[in-house]
Amino acid sequence: MHTFKNQDSLLGNIAEMKRRSEQVGYSLLNSPSTEDAGRRILNCATEVGLPAGINSGKPNYINFCNHRQCPTCQERRAKRACAAMHQLFDQNPNLVDGKWLFLTLTVRNCSTRNLKETLARMSDAFQRLTRRTFWQQNVLGAIRFTEVSVGQSDPCTAHPHFHCLLLVRPSMFAGIHYMSEERWASAWADVLQEHYIPTINVQRLNCPPNEVRTQVVSMAGYSTKARLETPDPQWLIEVTQQMRGYRSVQAYGLLARPQLQPQVYGVTEDACKPFIPAGRFTWNRITKQYQRL
């Protein structure tokens, strides 16, 4: 069997994600509560089928595990989110003339043991936000992505936050309906029912119509990106337990199209069926590389 080490190839990129997934899988094996998840992730992407020429195209087949914490599958979700946004623009070309905001909503870092409770409180707050008059009058559609990262000031804490793509009316950029970053922060603090002003960020998509699609797709990919580094095992174990069953993506208004959501956000088994690929490869756990069958 020949082992491939070309990191610039398509197979090399898959191998890099597989190595990161193995780190996560072995971390989750350290606790009985996440042992099954660890095994599931370790068995992800052990088989790859590629079209002719491994330096181009895309895989014909990968046995994905579809676990939330798997970097390989998270990268796949990011690509699917981008593809679904392209589909959305294909179905409604007028979206390039729309006004878009990229809104990030945060709360104070929480203990990993309180993550489930914090996420529930944030979700309830966001629902209250969508019922506010300014939202009802100006936000035509939204997609909310949840991301949980390691707290920078304390690695034992979690930093949950929402990335939100908003399609809004032009009136939201001027006059009495204008929402400054300060007004967004105040509104978010109010629905959170907190006594502090949380950190938020608002980016207005200010580009020509021919660049809007690219920017929106890029934001969808950014919001669903895989972690670059594997967190501490104990952090990962606790966060995995706390997020079990949590829905990380929600769509609203004009962006909540039923025919799109299963493609973008579903975590069901891959639709690819077994076939005879031009190149079949299997993962070697010792060399940490793929080898041809």
Image (tube, rainbow, N blue to C red):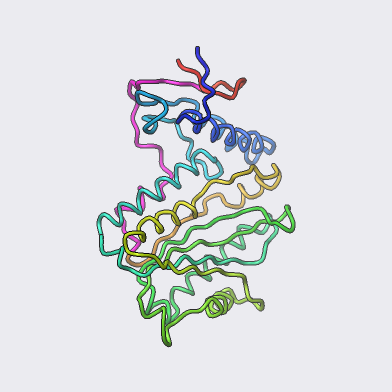
Magenta stretch in the rendered image: 255-282
User: Image quadrant for the C terminus?
Assistant: top left
Residue placed furthest toward the bottom: 176
Quarter holding residue 19: top right
In the image, is residue 155 above or below residue 22? below
Q: Is residue 293 left or right of residue 93?
A: right
Q: Is residue 113 left or right of residue 267?
A: right
In the image, is residue 126 above or below residue 7? below
Image point (54%, 35%), residue name: 17
Q: Position of residue 197 (x, y in %)?
A: 63, 76
Q: Of 39 and 199, which appears nearest the observer?
A: 199
Image point (35%, 58%), residue name: 213
Q: In the rendered picture of this protein, how many numbered marks are placed on residues?
A: 0
Q: Position of residue 79 (x, y in %)?
A: 42, 45
Q: Position of residue 33 (x, y in %)?
A: 64, 41
Image point (50%, 26%), residue name: 46
Q: Is residue 262 magenta?
A: yes
Secondary structure mostly seen in the magenta stretch: loop
Residue placed furthest toward the top: 1
Q: Of 169 and 33, which appears nearest the observer?
A: 169
